[in-house]
Amino acid sequence: MAVSKDMTIMEIINVNEGIAPILMNAGMHCLGCAMAHGETLEEACMVHGIDADALMDEINAFLGE
C-alpha cells in the first residue's frame, strides 16, 4: 500500500509502524499528539516546513523495500 499526502499521520503509521522514525527524523516529533490523529501528511508538513512530496517519496521508498 502506498502512502499519499491526503492520508492522516495515524493512517500512515498504521500502514507500517516503521514509518514513525522516518517522520520523527523529518522533524515531526509530536506523533502522539491529538493533531496527528486528524492532520494529513500534507498539513503536517506545511506546519513543520517540510517538503511533503519528498517525505511521501521517502516513506513510499521505505515501503517498497
Image (tube, rainbow, N blue to C red):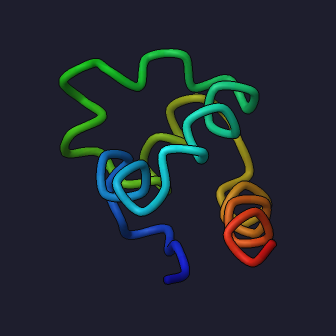
Please give the name of the residue rendered at 27% of the width and 18% of the height, measured from the top-left corner.
33
Give the x, y percent position of residue 48.
59, 29
Q: In the shown orientation, is residue 33 left or right of residue 59?
A: left
- Toward the bottom, the furthest residue is 1
Please give the name of the residue rendered at 42% of the width and 48% of the height, measured from the top-left corner.
13
Give the x, y percent position of residue 65.
81, 72
Please give the name of the residue rendered at 41% of the width and 25% of the height, measured from the top-left corner.
31
Q: In the shown orientation, is residue 59 left or right of residue 36?
A: right
Please give the name of the residue rendered at 50% of the width and 74% of the height, measured from the top-left corner.
4
The vertical placement of 27 against 52, above or below, is above
The vertical placement of 33 against 11, above or below, is above
The vertical placement of 2 against 48, above or below, is below
The vertical placement of 21 against 15, above or below, is above
Q: Nearer the viewer, residue 47 or 41?
A: 41
The quadrant in which residue 7 appears is bottom left
Give the x, y percent position of residue 23.
62, 37
Give the x, y percent position of residue 63.
67, 69
User: How many callouts does the rendering have?
Assistant: 0
Q: In the shown orientation, is residue 34 left or right of residue 32?
A: left
